[in-house]
């Protein structure tokens, strides 16, 4: 992004708000240098398909914030920006078959590796051949078969490719081009360039991508919906949306206590530490019951029981929706509004594979859990700041470059034939 300053401006346009942060990494610590959130009048900012409704309003808000941060740091000009996109994405599987058994078709050197073939195969898919109405956001190798045998993706360089029959299955993440351009336009019209763009589920995954277990489930809890992504070896295999969120917990509490959702929200998010074991007989609410002519009393331990039962029920629904009968054991990382419930870790993390992801960052005095997607994209950008697709082979020796040319020619011919 902005290599001279190591500052990463990140924007996320949500359905009811716009979040803008400038993030810096200092000695492996995340520092939120600047943060501002736009809520407007509460009206929907995006359509149900994720397209920006009024780009002028958003551009004006972003321009004001860029001006503020650039005035704060004199002579600073932030041009490159990261963009967190909605999860209105599709997963496409594409298969490439390479018959390398015919030596007259492709004269290979011994130095050719499957890893090199895969790097080049990623460029094989012309977006226009998939659809002119979509944009490719991610293209990774999902599976590789050599002579009909599935190979370990971590051992590609150890496989001799001469005279082999290779099948490569790639996973392509696409998004509607109109949606993408509507988000991008809010920045380009004020002279900014989108350098990194990832769907929110990917940005959240970046927060835990370095964890040991390659099988991960990302759960993004929101007020009235939950989005879940299943990742295998950093590749999104499945995404599920559920039409309920933490509002379902609040509704259960409101029904039990006979109060409205706003008051229920205060009891769930502000008044009780649900991780405490010392809640018995602590009165948190009382009301005169005209029908029974007695005082109805709600204790903290009873309220904890109501919240706990509803979370367990919802959490099981989440697991059932995303995990098929499989031998893999997944670590589940919970982000979003659920992390704002005091002591929720004791309610959700019932095994060593359940995690609550939400923390306050240096400089972020609002709510750390709300920044995770922006921090995740900045983390990705910081990790890849020196990597450019056009520079992949700059440090390779002459022999490797010759091999690369051979591979290039093969895939050029392959692309023309498709």
Image (cartoon, rainbow, N blue to C red):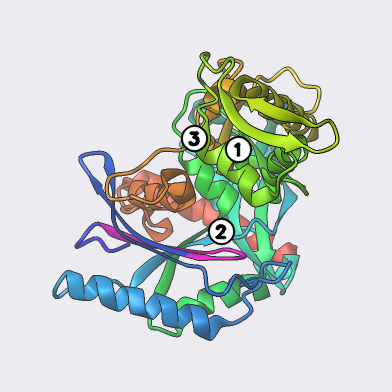
Q: Quarter-wise, where is residue 292 in the image?
A: top right
Residue 76, image x, y percentages? 19, 72
Of the numbered discs in the image, which one, if any, rests on residue 32? none
Residue 92, image x, y percentages? 74, 52
Task: Give 232 or 263, whichever is nearer the viewer.
Answer: 263
In the rendered image, the quadrant that contains the N terminus is bottom left
Q: Image point 70% across, 71% down: which residue?
A: 47
Of the numbered discs in the image, which one, if any, rests on residue 218? 1
Q: Secondary structure at mark 2?
A: helix
Segment tinted magenta in the rendering: 7-18
71 left or right, relative to 268? left
Q: Which residue is mark 2?
A: 409
Residue 294, image x, y percentages? 76, 29
Instruction: Give the farthest residue toward the left.
Output: 74
- Decide which of tag 1 and tag 3 comes sooner along the chain: 1
Q: Which residue is mark 3?
A: 357
Spatial separation of the CA atoms under disc 2 and disc 1: 40 Å
């Amino acid at each position: 992004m902005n290599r001279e300053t190591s500052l990463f401006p990140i924007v996320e346009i949500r359905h009811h708000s716009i979040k803008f942060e400038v993030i810096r990494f200092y000695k492996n610590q995340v520092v939120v240098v600047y943060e501002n959130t736009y809520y407007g009048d509460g009206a929907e900012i995006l359509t149900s398909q994720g397209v920006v409704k009024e780009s002028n309003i958003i551009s004006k808000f972003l321009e004001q914030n860029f001006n503020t941060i650039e005035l704060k740091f004199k002579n600073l000009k932030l041009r490159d920006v990261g963009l967190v996109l909605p999860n209105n994405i599709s997963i496409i599987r594409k298969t490439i078959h390479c018959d390398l058994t015919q030596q007259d078709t492709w004269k290979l050197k011994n130095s050719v590796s499957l890893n090199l073939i895969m790097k080049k195969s990623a460029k094989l898919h012309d977006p226009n051949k998939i659809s002119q109405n979509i944009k490719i956001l991610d293209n990774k190798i999902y599976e590789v078969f050599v002579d009909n045998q599935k190979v370990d993706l971590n051992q590609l360089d150890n496989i001799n490719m001469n005279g082999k029959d290779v099948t490569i299955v790639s996973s392509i993440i696409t998004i509607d081009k109109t949606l993408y351009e509507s988000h991008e336009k809010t920045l380009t019209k004020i002279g900014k360039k989108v350098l990194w763009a990832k769907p929110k589920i990917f940005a959240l995954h970046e927060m835990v991508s370095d964890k040991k277990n390659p099988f991960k489930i990302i759960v993004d809890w929101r007020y009235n919906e939950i989005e879940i992504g299943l990742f295998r070896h950093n590749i999104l295999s499945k995404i599920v949306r559920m039409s309920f969120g933490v509002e379902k917990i609040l509704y259960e509490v409101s029904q039990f206590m006979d109060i409205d959702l706003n008051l229920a929200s205060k009891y769930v998010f502000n008044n009780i530490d649900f991780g405490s074991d010392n809640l018995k007989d602590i009165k948190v609410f009382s009301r005169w019951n005209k029908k029974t002519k007695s005082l109805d009393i709600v204790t903290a331990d009873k309220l904890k029981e109501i919240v706990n039962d509803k979370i367990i029920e919802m959490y099981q629904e989440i697991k059932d929706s995303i995990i098929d009968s499989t031998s893999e054991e997944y670590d589940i990382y919970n982000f979003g509004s659920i992390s704002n419930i005091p002591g929720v870790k004791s309610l959700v993390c019932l095994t060593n594979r359940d995690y609550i992801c939400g923390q306050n960052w240096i400089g972020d005095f609002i709510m750390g859990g709300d920044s995770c997607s922006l921090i995740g994209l900045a983390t990705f950008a910081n990790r890849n700041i020196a990597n450019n697709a056009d520079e992949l082979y700059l440090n390779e020796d002459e022999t490797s470059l010759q091999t690369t040319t051979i591979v290039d020619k093969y895939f050029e011919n392959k692309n023309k034939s498709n």
